[in-house]
Image (tube, helix red, strand yellow):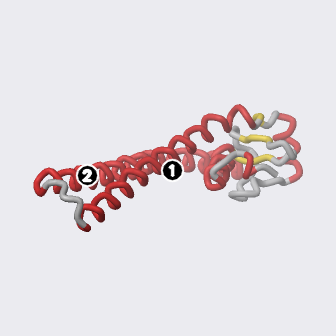
Amino acid sequence: KEEPRRIDRRMEILEAAHSSRLSVLDTAVFALQLLAYALTVCHFIHIWSLHGLQFTLIDGVLALHLHSAISSAGKKISERRNLNRIARDLDGLFDDATELEMRKAAAAGDVCCICLGTMSASNVKKVGCGHLYHTHCLREVVERARSIEAARC
């Protein structure tokens, strides 16, 4: 009986470390994407500053690419803000599972439907329909759905 708990605890530690690394990597990718858009915008402005704005076909194509780079950067920033809002609101919208609910789930052999891990972890959320999920699993599903409403049971 002690072995499964030890394994579950080890899995929690590994998942926390993985989540931390994934967060750092995600932030780095976001920053590099914004940097790429900024460099693209600077490149087009530099071309115009060297050759002047002559309202030719080439200037039209540059303007379209400039618009595309700016709108893509805005979309990335908007998506990032939405994901941060979802993560922030997740704790307020879903209650933590009580100790009694955790014991019932463990006795029934219930597992998280997302990762199929046991419910012995401390970070478990209860959704409106009564299902229990690990917090990190629920966050991942909600982020993929892009809204909390879309991920409800």
Question: Which is more toward the observer, 86 or 17?
Answer: 86
Q: Is residue 21 left or right of residue 110?
A: left
Residue indicated by mark 2: 39
Secondary structure under the numbered disc 1 in the rendered image: helix
Q: Amino acid at mark 2?
A: Leu
Q: Residue furthest bottom?
A: 57
Vertical relation: 48 (above or below) 27:
below
Say whether residue 42 is visible.
yes
Disc 2/disc 1 C-alpha distance (Å): 31 Å
Residue 61, x across and y down, in percent: 30, 65
Q: Residue at x 71, y 32 (%)?
A: 92
Residue 22, x across and y down, in percent: 48, 50
Q: Residue at x 78, y 54 (%)?
A: 111
Question: Which is more toward the observer, 102 or 8?
Answer: 102
Q: Residue furthest left?
A: 50
Between circles 2 and 1, the one closer to the viewer is 2
Q: Amino acid at mark 1?
A: His
Q: Residues within 10 Å of mark 2 (few under 14, many from 20)?
A: few
Labels in figure, total: 2
Say whether residue 1 is visible.
no
Numbered circle sitting on residue 18: 1
Q: Residue at x 33, y 53 (%)?
A: 37
Q: Residues within 10 Å of mark 1 (few under 14, many from 20)?
A: few
Numbered circle sitting on residue 87: none
Question: Which is more toward the observer, 147 or 99?
Answer: 147
| Residues at marks 2 and 1 touching, judged by CB atoms closer than 8 Å | no
Q: Residue at x 52, y 48 (%)?
A: 79
**Residue 50 position by quadrant:** bottom left
Q: Is residue 88 left or right of residue 39?
A: right
Vertical relation: 55 (above or below) 80:
below
Residue 53, x across and y down, in percent: 19, 55
Residue 68, x across and y down, in percent: 38, 58
